[in-house]
Image (spheres, grey):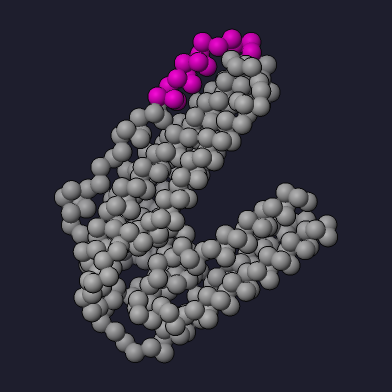
Amino acid sequence: MITQVGWLVLVTAGFLLLPATARPTLPFGIRVPRERAGELRPIRVAYRVVVVVLGATATAGALAGATGLLPVLVVACLLAHWAAAGFVARAKRSWPQVRQGMTADTSLRTDPVRLPWPYLAPAPAIVAGTAVLGLVSDPVQRTESTSWSAASPVTHQLVVLALALSAVVTIPRARPELDAARPESSARAYRAYLAGTVRIVALLATAVIAALAVKALLSWRLVTPGSVWTALTIALPAAAFAVALIWLVRAGDAGHRLDRDDTEDTGVVQRDDDRHWHLGGLVYANRTDPALLVHQRVGSRWTLNLGHPASWLTLVAFLVLALLAN
């Protein structure tokens, strides 16, 4: 019961913070002019009230002994977010039309964000070291292990490494998220955001791979089991996730908090493509868009363009990797 209550509180807090992670021009996944964003405060307040009521009701039910409330709360909060997006879209339709435009930063192709090799190098080194230790360890001890096979730790590490490498290669090549109203300042901020994000991905991968290496050492009995080693398997990823969270809060969604130039204003707003975004900015599907990877409007991460045929092949590849990790 205590575990369920803890997860319910965390989910409620996450959905309460979700609107604050979005750019000011994308409340609940709907694109609006910057000067109009303040008019939507009542919708944000109403959304947070609904989430608090949902979270409090689910927590009370868990304390009373009910089970299985976590997925119900997640779905209910997602529906609340979707409803808030609908209210924003309705308010937007009553506003006068504004000039729309697009901007591009060609330097992201001619001078792309470099791969963070110093951050990436430790991860494959740890994988190689784990594989070597697995080969030289006592095979009797490996076969006596009930939870891990000899190859399982290295397989998990390779899956994490493959995901990280694919992320740091594809993210800088995804379609950039720029603001036509502030083309130069948003381009600078987005480049800084990309550079920081690929470093964070490399850091997270290294921490998870290191934690898997510690688990392998425990499983193969190459170290004496103890609370310190067990704590390392949790502390290493937790510390990396804490650093990632701090970076995301500081940078903001697509780096909008790194854009500190308030003097630039072209008099236009970014082109409206709301019709291609679904479920409050969570899902993107556009058959005419050649981009495979786009920055999601909610949650400060990238998502697949489900209108692109290659996106389904990518999902199948991720499914295969997930099956290999089990």
> Left or right: where does residue 51 sit relative to residue 274?
right
Residue 30 at x, y = what percent? 42, 74
Q: Please state the extent of the stretch shown in magenta in the rendering.
A: 125-141
* Quadrant for the C terminus in the image: top right
Residue 200 at x, y = what percent? 40, 44
> Left or right: where does residue 184 sit relative to residue 221?
left
Q: Residue at x 68, y 16 (%)?
A: 144
Quick check: 137 above or below 82? above
**Residue 86 lies within the magenta run:** no
Q: Which residue is drawn at 78% across and 63% down?
A: 61
Quick check: 209 above or below 150? below
Residue 23 at x, y = what percent? 40, 67
Asked whether the viewer can see residue 155, the reply is: no
Seen from the viewer's position, the closer of residues 288 and 280 is: 280
Quick check: 255 above or below 142? below
Asked whether the viewer can see residue 249, the reply is: yes
Seen from the viewer's position, the closer of residues 283 and 211 is: 211
Q: Toward which corner of the image does residue 129 lie, by quadrant?
A: top left
Overall secondary structure of the magenta section: helix
Q: Residue at x 46, y 16 (%)?
A: 132
Q: Which residue is drawn at 83% across and 57% down?
A: 65
> Left or right: where does residue 286 sit relative to residue 69?
left
**Residue 136 lies within the magenta run:** yes
